[in-house]
């Protein structure tokens, strides 16, 4: 009972920090860039969720399950983590290549400005950082290290939020995209620094040789998460795209502000 209460408090603290950071960041964007900037930021968030979700699928709920089931069996943990890392790196290459190829039409259609191709490319190149961070959090979750995962999550949220806020403050909309990209790198750095010090962490589990049965098992479990990580952000991207075509970026930004309060 005490463990459940402690985990609930830690989770509440993490959610509170995420809520406050998101609210302040969105408020700053609304002040400096107006409703249109808020709508573009929402598009970026959904793109990040979808692309990183695809790349990180092998290292999410499936790894939590396999790690928890393995317990203290280092061999099973090693097979799962090394397979997940290799699968994530392979998917990251595919996602980044697709993002680079589609950078120009994506900047024009989803962000509304063809001149944002270079910032968008930087944003796409930072996607692997989010995916690798997700793997670290799943490993911590599977090991039952709720405290370490929460502390890392709080510091990462604040650090990445500050990067986005600093970017929009210094350079407007392009700065916002650069800030989001840099924030994703900071997210990985902070997560790694904090979680690599935990007693359960070992590089040997990630870099050890893997086998095809373990890789197939990880990818099979990854399939469970792919539908959710693609459909939810993709539907939101589509809704905003339709709203922009019908009412423009300003009206879409007002809708996004109300939607964010609802969230």
Image (cartoon, rainbow, N blue to C red):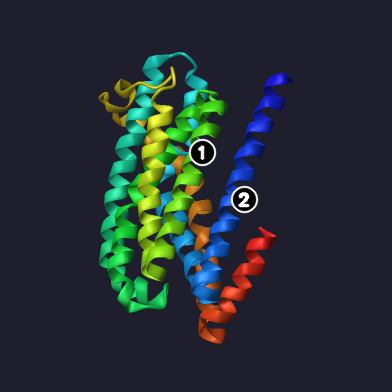
Say which label, 1 or 2, has the lower sequence index.
2
Q: What crowding class fits label 2: few (fewer than 14 Cα within 10 Å), some (14-19), or many (20 or more)?
A: some
Image location of residue 9, percent across then percent down: 68, 32
Closer to the camera in the image, 188 or 244 = 188
Q: In this view, does 262 lie above or below 65?
A: below
Distance in Å between CA atoms under marks 1 and 2 = 13 Å
Q: In which quarter of the image is the N terminus?
A: top right
Asked which quadrant contains residue 247, the reply is: bottom right
Q: Furthest-right residue in view? A: 1
Q: Mark 2 points at which residue?
A: 19
Q: In this view, does 144 lie above or below 158?
A: above
Q: Mark 1 points at which residue?
A: 153
Image location of residue 79, percent across then percent down: 35, 24
Q: Is residue 44 above or below residue 22?
A: below
Asked which quadrant contains residue 222, the reply is: top left
Residue 20 shows in this picture: yes
Asked whether, in this view, residue 123 is left or right of residue 40, the answer is left
Residue at x 50%, y 45% (from the top left corner): 157
Image location of residue 117, percent across then percent down: 29, 70
Look at the numbered disc 2 and give the secondary structure of its residue. helix
Residue at x 41%, y 57% (from the top left corner): 180
Asked whether, in this view, residue 246 is left or right of residue 9, the answer is left
Q: Furthest-bottom residue in view? A: 246
């Amino acid at each position: 009972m005490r463990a459940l209460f402690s985990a609930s408090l830690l989770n509440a603290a993490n959610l509170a920090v995420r809520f406050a950071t998101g609210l302040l960041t969105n408020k700053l964007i609304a002040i400096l860039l107006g409703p249109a900037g808020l709508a573009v930021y929402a598009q970026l968030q959904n793109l990040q969720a979808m692309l990183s979700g695809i790349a990180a699928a092998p290292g999410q709920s499936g790894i939590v399950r396999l790690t928890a089931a393995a317990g203290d069996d280092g061999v099973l943990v090693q097979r799962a983590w090394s397979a997940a890392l290799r699968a994530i790196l392979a998917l990251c290459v595919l996602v980044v290549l697709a993002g680079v190829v589609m950078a120009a039409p994506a900047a024009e259609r989803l962000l509304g400005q063809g001149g944002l191709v270079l910032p968008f490319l930087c944003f796409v190149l930072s996607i692997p950082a989010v995916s690798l961070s997700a793997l670290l959090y799943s490993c911590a979750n599977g090991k039952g290290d709720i405290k370490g995962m929460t502390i890392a999550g709080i510091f990462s949220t604040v650090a990445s939020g500050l990067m986005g806020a600093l970017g929009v403050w210094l350079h407007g909309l392009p700065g916002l995209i650069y800030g989001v990209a840099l924030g994703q790198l900071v997210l990985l750095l902070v997560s790694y620094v904090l979680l690599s010090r935990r007693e359960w962490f070992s590089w040997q589990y990630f870099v050890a040789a893997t086998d095809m049965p373990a890789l197939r098992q990880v990818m099979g479990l990854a399939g469970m998460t792919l539908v959710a990580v693609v459909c939810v952000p993709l539907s939101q991207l589509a809704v905003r795209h339709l709203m922009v075509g019908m009412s423009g970026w300003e009206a879409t930004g007002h809708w996004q502000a109300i939607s964010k309060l609802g969230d």
